[in-house]
Amino acid sequence: MKSNRLQSNPDKVEILWCATNRCQHQLPTTPLSIDGAAVNPVKSVRDLGIIYIDADLVMRTHVQRTVSRCYAALRQLRQIRRSVPPSTFQSLVVTLVLSRLDYGNAVLVGLPTHLVRRLQSVQNAAARLIYHMRSADHITDALVTLHWLRVPLRIEYKVAVMTYKVLHGTAPRYLGPLALVSHVSDIPGRRTLRSANTSRLLVPPVRLSTVGSRAFTIAGPRIWNLLPEETTSAQSLSTFRQRLKDFPLHEVS
């Protein structure tokens, strides 16, 4: 901050110690002095205004706040449902509800099932609101008609698109291809394997499956390797997106 001539604001500075749930009790709880001000550690922090990161990286706070805001938007939309055309109302639901579910959802890969179900309940409620359905009605046909992927597939779709961008050099600089993902054919000793003649990526070993497998370096190659060669060999991002939508993504899960 000093090198960029920035002045810290003790009222806005937060400290987050990250560790697995089992090691949470080992984290320090004493205040840390930053620029002469004592700052207490917190259990969760807000990043980019919407993404909330928990100390155990479970994203529990993010899911709770996202679900709460989405249901609040649905309650407001219910009041104007009969006052706007159906196409306009559907656009409002996509803009005010689904956009919240999709924002930064790549960090939700590998999320515990009970948290995914909470996010899925929001999407189900949005579809029922559009088609005037009861809570007991089956939702599958409505999601198919709306062309909405379920929440777990929307997350994996986002990770697959991000992996494609990394491999083609269009991703942000911090997601450089050399640092995060590697083709099997680029690994010495594996160039003679049959997998070296495909677009398969190397999936590094992980020590903690509960946390490590959720990292982009693991989740990206894992999802990518489950896609057909026809999809991964797409020459443009738009073609890749289209083929990815046509591919039965439920086989990836």
Image: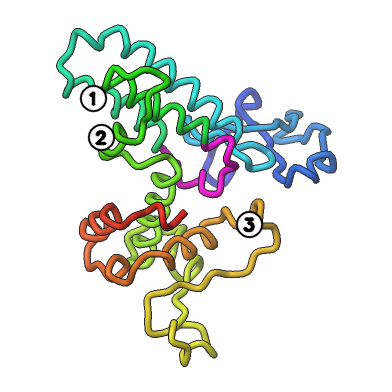
Q: Residue at x 68, y 36 (%)?
A: 15
113 within the magenta span: yes
* Dot label at residue 146: 2
Q: Are marks 1 and 3 in contact (CB under 8 Å)?
A: no
Camera-near label (1 vs 2) is 2
Task: Tell me the quadrant of the picture where the N terminus can be found.
Answer: top right
- Farthest-out residue, front: 137
Mark number, residue 212? 3
Q: Amino acid at mark 3?
A: Gly
Q: Which residues are magenta?
A: 103-116
Q: Where does residue 231 sit, x and y in percent of width and height? A: 29, 65
**Relative to 206, is 95 on the left or the right?**
left
Other-residue count near label 2 (Cα within 10 Å), few / some / many at <14 / 14–19 / ≥20: few
Q: Are marks 1 and 2 in contact (CB under 8 Å)?
A: yes
Percent across and percent down for residue 64 are 56, 26
Quote the CA–CA distance across marks 1 and 2.
9 Å
Of marks 3 and 2, the one in the foreground: 2
Vertical relation: 90 (above or below) 242: above
Please give the name of the residue rendered at 33% of the width and 55% of the height, measured from the top-left corner. Answer: 248
In front: 134, or 156? 134
Of callouts 3 and 2, the N-terminal one:
2
Amino acid identity at mark 1? Gln
**Is tag 1's residue or tag 2's residue first in the polypeptide sequence?**
1
Label disc, if present, on residue 90 of the rendered structure: 1
* Secondary structure under the numbered disc 3 in the rendered image: helix
Please tell me which residue lies in front, 170 or 33. Answer: 170
In percent of the image, x 47 and y 60: which residue is there? 220
